[in-house]
Image (tube, rainbow, N blue to C red):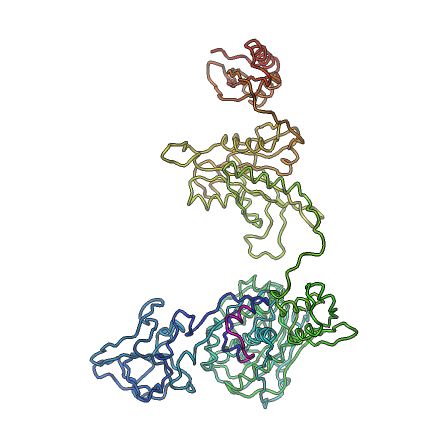
Amino acid sequence: MRVPISWLKEFVDLTLPIETLAEKLTLAGLEVEAIEYIGLPGSELPWDRDKIFVAQVLEVTRHPNADRLLLATVDYGAGQPITVVTGAPNLKPGDRGQKVVLALRGARLYDGHKEGRVIMTLKEATLRGIKNDSMVCSEKELGLSDDHSGILILPDDAPVGMPLADYLGDAVLHIAILPNMARCASILGVAREVAALTGQTVRLPPTHYVAEGPDVHASVRLNITDGQLNPRFTATVVRGVRVGAAPFWMQRRLQLCGMRPINNLVDISNYVMLELGQPNHLFDYHAVRPDAEGYRTIITRRAQPGETLQTLDGVTRTLQPDDILVCDAHGPLSLAGVMGGASSEVTDATDTLLIEVATWHPASIRKTARHHTLFSEASARFARGVPPALAPFAQARLLHLVQTLVGGTIDRGMCDAYPKPQPTVTVDLRPARVRQFLGVDLPTETMTHILRALEFTVEEHDGVLRVTAPDHRLDIEGEHDLIEEIARIHGYDALPATLIAESIPPAQSDPALAFEEQVRDLLVRLGLQEVVTYRLTAPEREARTRAPDAPAEEALYVALANPLTPDRRVMRRSLIGGMLEVIGANLHHRERLALFELGPVYHPVPDATLPHELPRLLIALTGPRALPHWGGGDTALMDFFDLKGVVSALLRDLHIQGVRWQPSTHPSLAPGRTAALVQGARVLGVIGELHPAVREAWALPNQPVLLADLDVAALREAVAADYTVAEVPRFPATVEDIAVVVDERVSAAEVEQVIREAGGALLYDVRLFDVYRGEQIGAQRKSLAWSLTYQAPDRTLSTKEVERVRNKIIRALEARLGAALRQA
């Protein structure tokens, strides 16, 4: 929110420098993100106080040597008027009396003829034979806007000779209004905070007006169908208005707050919203169609199925049951609290206004704004809560401004439907409790002073403060809220730094979390990078991770009741979709990816409120094994065995033993290139190459994408309870190779298991280094070549000892697997 200092000064005296005030507001919970200076020191282009002035046009004549140029003689309070050459289209020969901005030679301005904001210094020049060293300025040249269509015309009461920095110079506080400070989403709201922090008094804006028209109840009726959704609705009528431009001061304040001036009526509506924090809406009275009895009956209700409304932006919107509508007897007029309807908007022909000031249920406004993607200043305020008690005050302020600036006759009275009155909140505050919470011995008188400065009513009864919240505070519920208010205004920085009085409880270990962190650390050491993807997804996205020929599956999802976007409306059941998105995005910039994600997936439980949150680990590899460099390197594309190596290393470092690799299937992986990791009866996960059809569905390059989808809970359960750590062998090892021929159906893991069991304690290591298939060994047979390492911890093995172990291994292979020793 933008808060112009000049506007803030109308409500409260500022006794601190702007930077100090900004710091105080920030420490009190109103975070000042930036201070924007306009024309003052601190801005990109301060207006020179001795070179840029308010001036008045005395005479405008034609340039003797140019049809499109004029000579303007202006008075800027220096005694001697000055004549400048100008081509401004909003001046014409014979003009006099206009107040303008005059810049003298040496003034620094923005170049109005160049794109963007390019600073120039005004110098003397000859324009068609006439010397010129000064100029009358446009808004762009002053940095007020990008408008260079004509010079800036100031109000008639602008004081001639005043430095422009004194007349239009300003500073704007950019304040982040957090949800807990929603009451401050107005100039008056910020002024209340400033007054409390600096010991000043808030001044309320004038609201007096004279109502001389007919009784408003004779022409307008209100009908609220649901007081929960619409706690209050007020309406007034003003006749005989004329649409035109708002005064300069109002337009300027709206611009400083980031809003575009439109016309006097709309600008007054926006002005009151920014000033008081109460959004409002203006209807063309004649566009509100009368009912059968001739009344303009305003009805607030929920939208009906299939109902539509064309909003002010020209879009015809299909409404949802959660939308609240403001209607006449014949149909919708506006989308309550969010945007008006095109059929009843104020136009240049409008001569009678029906003014709405109402309050709406915050959650309903949030849903409507999100559903229709209509986020506005009004909906932002209603979505955080607007006090119903504010409505009559805002109506009076609107009527005052309309009568003062536009004219017209105001109908007597105000239609006010108030089905759900705002409750008065009274809280008993114990001073001892305040001191206990804040850790500082604040006197009760100080607490009372702070609360009264914030406009709370405070009475003391038997040592307890009975505190009544003001109407503009919807956030006060209990004693804790009052303690927070006292702490804010006293100053968080003024609270002493003390050690906690109680002993800190011992830390509780979380084995599951510790295991996950261990897995992350190990994978990073293996050269992988962690990614974190969205836990929200859509069923269509997850369906793209399944190959077309995969068995059909009716997947149930945990659905969000109020999703931010249809693309993120359910909780994920798998990590694969998010990982493929990351791979697709990053392969545009990197050749090689080695990634992992460790996070939960969500499976709904029938008849249960909460789903199962199952921790999963997904590893992904794609691209070359190594990037090219001057020393060479293996740049072949990674395949299944690269992924198997990473997973094997992870299992080894986790001390997970006895894992078998079995052929398997997975709906996302290619048949024949997929394996399951099994330990006993426990399935740890599956690894393989992404199915080509899935790869194409995600528009990935034509190269292998390797995935390992592992069950983290199963991995943790598979970790050995204890394991043996052996010292480094002191005696030399004997290494020899053997090749055995087995049936094609026998896996290498089965062969390795037999070798290890037969080799016993003297077999130190087993490693498969070659697989061969060919005519020499016959059909449906394969040769597996193994490197065997024999070693004893207490001696050097003799040749006979090694031979006995080798023969035992060969006999076991022959007997248990039907293997034969392959002859050279």
Q: Position of residue 506 (x, y in %)?
A: 70, 47
- Residue 193 percent location from the top left of the image: 59, 73
Q: Which residues are magenta?
A: 10-23
* 104 sits to left or right of 670: left
Is residue 145 shown in magenta?
A: no
Q: Is residue 241 left or right of residue 366?
A: left
Q: Position of residue 690 (x, y in %)?
A: 50, 37
Residue 43 at x, y percent in the picture: 42, 70
Query: Taking 216 as reference, is 525 above or below it?
Result: above
Q: Nearer the viewer, residue 236 or 798?
A: 798
813 relative to 164, above or below: above
Q: Is residue 336 left or right of residue 97?
A: right
Q: Quick check: can you spot residue 547?
A: no
When asked about the image quadrant of residue 613, the answer is top right
Residue with the most extreme right position: 462
Count of numbered tags = 0
Residue at x 62% of width, y 28% of height: 657
Query: Residue pushed farthest bottom?
Result: 212
Q: Would you say residue 617 is visible in this rendering?
A: yes
Q: Residue at x 77, y 72 (%)?
A: 463
- Quarter residue 479 falls in: bottom right
